[in-house]
Amino acid sequence: MSTIVSESLFQQLVTGFQEQETAAEPAALTAIRQAAFARFQAVGFPTVKHEDWKYTNIHKLVSQPYVLNADVAIDNLDFSAGDIPALDAHRIVVVNGQYVLTFASLEAEAGLTVKSIEDAVEEPEFIAHFAQHADQTDSALVALNTALYTTGVYIHVAKNAVLSKPIQIIHVSTGVDEFFAQTRSLVVLAQNAEAEIIESFITLAGTAKNFQNKVVEVVLKENAKLQHYYLQVAEAASNYTFHTEVYQEKHSVYNNYNCNFPGASFVRHNINVRLDAENVESHLYGINLTADDQLVDIHTIVDHLKPHCESYEWYKNITQDSSTAVFNGKIYVREDAQKTNAFQQNNNMLISDKSAVYTKPQLEIFADDVKCSHGCTIGQFDNDALFYLRARGIGEHSARILLVHAFAFDVTSRFSNEIVRAYVEELASKGLDRN
Amino acid sequence: MLSIKNLHASIGDKQILKGLNLEVKPGEVHAIMGPNGAGKSTLGNVLAGRDSYEVTEGSATLDGVDLLDLSPEDRAREGVFLAFQYPVEIPGVSNINFLKTAVNDIRAYKGLAPMEAKEFLRMVKEKQQLVEFSANLANRSLNEGFSGGEKKRNEIFQLAMLNPKLSILDETDSGLDIDALRIVANGVNQLRSENNAFLVITHYQRLLDYIVPDVVHVLYNGRIVKSGPKELALELEEKGYDWLKELDAQNAL
């Protein structure tokens, strides 16, 4: 059995960490990485015995070796799979765990700093916030990322700066070797700053199986506003674990729109929001349209720590073929968080009788003067509605697409960006057209 | 136009239509009356193609086209329109979007290009006046939160937009107050022409005061047991349906 163990990703990572070149890094960062690796090494990868991983088995993903930090040629790569029609945005491209490519238009934007995370280690906001938020959780995958991330994006928007257009980050997977990669990003919006970040995930043709563990920390200072989109349009070769950790100060607004479409075989996304000041607003929206053997697992924590905050979460899952969707939404309303307004809803539409949905809304309230609600539904196509549409001359296929759009409407109608909304609706139609 | 011969249909194990014959010519309005459970709504649903009903025998053709072989959408494209007894609420689908899709799918079936947006909106404006439908209602989600009367008016609005050959009104009068009834009937009367026909399914003679039929049929136990001029409706109103049982027994012999 020892040969199998030595060929596992875990063993590779242990070796990789010992060999990691840290001489160029500030000593404080090296210390953070070492502490993080010790945490990871102590617990290892999560298994289905962990309550939070009950329906999501990463055993198969981590029990094989991968190439770590493979070199890939970045000339002539085609990023068009990440194009959003009619969207005018600043572009950043992240390739595997190796490269961050930034483009000239970013420099012209007043108040905006964009760097690769390895170039940002001297930035005061990096020193103040890196690994200060995500690493507070007991996530082994975050610890692993902190210990061994190789690249990522650092974004800082200065006080009072309002970006003129969105920043689109295209995460590209490519390469002929099976690889494991980790990126780490930090987004800090200073007081009154406003930004929109759209992250797209694509897989280039002919890419070998890959497993990517990505962590993003977001810090919103007083009255800052961030619109944050995740659009997973990758291919079956790609597998992702994501962790998004959001820390908000007073009067800040964080809106997350998390969309997964047929593509990546495995997606696990933990999104945690800490509302650690008064009058904070957080909105988490999601649409997951799954197909084939895909698994999309969303775990969220909305943690109300202070009074007078509002959180609003709405996830819609549409499962096809033998795919699986998992939703787990925790809301904590702490003792101090009086006058909290917290809403959570998860609706599921099973299109195929071989698909599965596991949903678990959880609400824990320790304050007594709050308004909270949560709920979830699981259903199928409404045959009466389908017949009604068909009886008006609408073809069965179009009718199904109309009904899925209608199902998603509660979420899509809240998108802040009409262009992204149209793009997502188109992706939903395409995702249904496959069958 | 519509020709139904010896139609038998069942739902599950239950035989509901047991040899129904009906001929409807262009320009005619036929009323179908009868007691609960006679098979009135089944007839409408079978013609429109609801798949919970199984046709076991007989035929139904519209201008020579065999309806029973077609999908519900193709029947609609051939010119069948069922005004639902219980219109479905579909939140998130706007009335207008829905109608545009329907109009253009029907046009595509006939080999026509999609309707110009301007022309479509002109038609919406014109047709919604027929049923005193406000722009506000037209722009809302399909039937969502509509009152009973608004839903029925929306059915007639859709009917006007799609301009079918054969319209089947399935208890369109149920749940309507007298004002809404008048509006709906008025809309239907304006849509009547030499080229289309209406099958009006109803329990009550009241609707037929407004939509005057050419022929009244009495459906009982899955068959048409009596047909006659519009006065037959009044007779039914007076005598009820009990006497039909005798008639049915005689027919069965």
Image: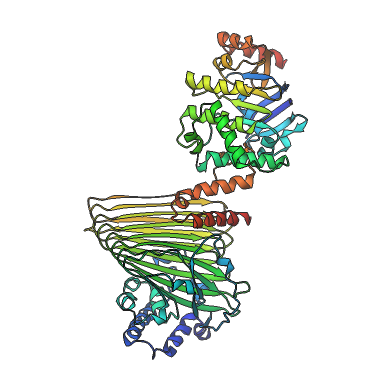
Specify the quadrant that holds the C terminus of chain A.
bottom right
Residue B48 in the figure: left or right of residue A360: right
B36 vs B91: above or below? above
B131 vs B89: above or below? above
Q: Residue furthest right?
A: B64
Rendered image coloring scheme:
rainbow
* Rendered location of residue B155, percent (x, y): 56, 30
B31 vs A183: above or below? above
* Rendered location of residue A149, percent (x, y): 43, 79
* Rendered location of residue A381, percent (x, y): 55, 46
* Rendered location of residue B115, percent (x, y): 64, 41
In this rendering, does residue A223 appear at all? Answer: yes
* Image-quadrant location for residue A253: bottom left
Q: Please tell me which residue is depicted at 57% across the width and 41% down the height of the picture.
A: B98
Q: Please tell me which residue is depicted at 54% across the width and 49% down the height of the picture.
A: A404
In this rendering, does residue B37 appear at all? Answer: no
Looking at the picture, tell me which residue is in the foreground, A347 or A155: A155
Looking at the picture, tell me which residue is in the foreground, A359 or B105: B105
Residue B15 in the figure: left or right of residue B156: right
Q: Please tell me which residue is depicted at 21% across the width and 58% down the height of the picture.
A: A336
Image label count: 0
A123 vs B241: above or below? below
